Image (spheres, rainbow, N blue to C red):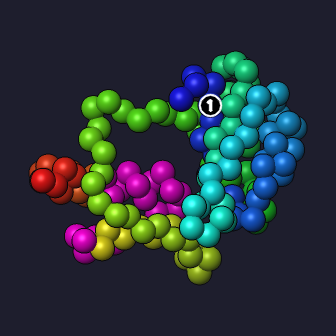
Amino acid sequence: MAPHTLFVSNFPFNTTEQELRAAFDRVCTISGVRVIMDRETGRSRGYAFVEVPDDEAVERAIEGLNETEFGGRRLVVNRARGKSATEPPLKHRIVIEWSDATNAYTAEVPSLGVCLSAPTLEAVVRQIRTRLTQGNDTLANPA
């Protein structure tokens, strides 16, 4: 992942790359926008990666857009982090869904009977990872 990439989440599923580009263009120069789409439904998964040219643009984007209202939701903008070499990949199917009723994501690991919720995708995945790796490495890396 490029060092000047932002992770953007919690926007409406019908948001287009052009709409995100317009929002970011108001606060900084951007190099590219990639909305992550669900392979099966073709619908946005509610998060994207936005590339900016330098650290100054990263800071302007985070200051100007993080926690602001966008399409009726509170936008989350952070510096993107690449996959950690020290974190093993999760070897379980995780089902993540947004609930308008609770304004939160619910993540379920059916094979383990684990179900958690959090306001952002990043937070719910972090909770799942923490829950699965607490004292039981076999859950994160089954044989």
Residue 90 appears in the picture as rendered: yes
Q: Quadrant of residue 15?
A: bottom right
* Left or right of 62 in this view: 25: right
Q: Which residue is drawn at 66% across and 61% down?
A: 44
Residue wearing tag 1: 5
Q: In this view, does 136 lie above or below 21?
A: below
Identify the amino acid type marked 1: Thr
Residue 125 in the magenta stretch? The answer is yes
The picture places residue 86, in percent across and down from the top left corner, at 27, 32
Residue drawn at (85%, 36%), measured in percent from left and top? Answer: 25
Q: In which quarter of the image is residue 139?
A: bottom left
The question of residue 93 being in magenta is answered with no
Q: Residue 87 placed where, x, y %?
A: 29, 38
Please rate how many residues cluster around mark 1, counting C-alpha atoms within 10 Å: few if below 14, some from 14 to 19, many from 20: many
Count of numbered badges drawn on the protein:
1
Relative vertical location of residue 29 with respect to residue 118 in this rendering, above or below: above
Image coordinates for residue 103, horizontal then vertical, percent: 58, 71
Residue name at image x 38 percent, y 64 percent: 94
What residue range appears in magenta? Answer: 111-129
Q: In this view, does 5 lie above or below 17?
A: above
Q: Nearer the viewer, residue 41 or 106?
A: 41
In the figure, residue 109 lies in which quadrant? bottom left
Image position of 21 (left or right of 7): right
At numbered mark 1, what does the secondary structure look like: helix, strand or loop?
A: strand
Residue found farthest to the bottom: 101
Q: Determine the residue located farthest toward the front in the rendered image.
A: 40
Q: Residue at x 78, y 30 (%)?
A: 30
Query: Observer-nearest residue: 42 or 23?
Result: 42
38 over 29 or under it: above or below: below
- Residue 46 seen by the camera: no
